[in-house]
Amino acid sequence: MDGWLLGKEAFIELLSGKGDPAKGVIQWAKSRGEASLYVSEMTWAVVRSIAESSSGLKRQNWLDLLDREVPRQFGIRLLPVDRALLEIWSRVANEPVGAANKPALIDESMEVATAIQYSLTYVVRESALAVKVRCPTESPWS
């Protein structure tokens, strides 16, 4: 599969429409084409949990966007968490990274595992874990 897996930060920026429209994720995504952008169900769930912790209208707007628009916009490009992915994740998650040699956060290790599973380029500002396990990355912010 060719394309790009949106990390949490890229996914949020794209959905919110916030950020510098001349550079960053929004312009980058326009140049790639919607059909080549993917998101993991895990990333969707992490962003949804962040939205759940908000209050009022902001919370409801994000939940509507995530629950209605994302499945419609992404369709089969909303990638499932399945056993094959979890097997890759179980190896990736144990890779020590950083100066403290601690395992990566669960959401980052799941995103890296998803990119590996589906042969996608991981869209993230930076990821020591992705570099360590040789997962290709691209940063629209650079």
Image (tube, grey):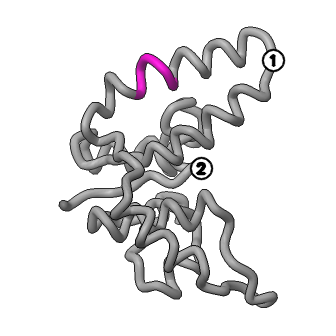
Badge 1 amino acid:
Ser
Furthest-front residue in view? 83
Q: Position of residue 106 (x, y in %)?
A: 63, 62
Magenta part of the protein: which range? 66-70
Most common secondary structure along the magenta stretch: helix
Query: Dots 1 and 2: beta carbons under 8 Å?
Result: no
Q: Nearer the viewer, mark 1 or mark 2?
A: 1
| N-term mark: 1 or 2 | 2
**Mark number, residue 9:** 2
Q: Position of residue 136 (x, y in %)?
A: 38, 75
Q: Quadrant of residue 1?
A: bottom left
Badge 2 amino acid:
Glu
Element marked by disc 1: loop
User: Where is mark 1, residue-wise?
Assistant: 55
C-alpha distance separating marks 1 and 2:
20 Å
Image vertical order of residue 110 relative to residue 93, above or below: above
Q: Is residue 48 magenta?
A: no
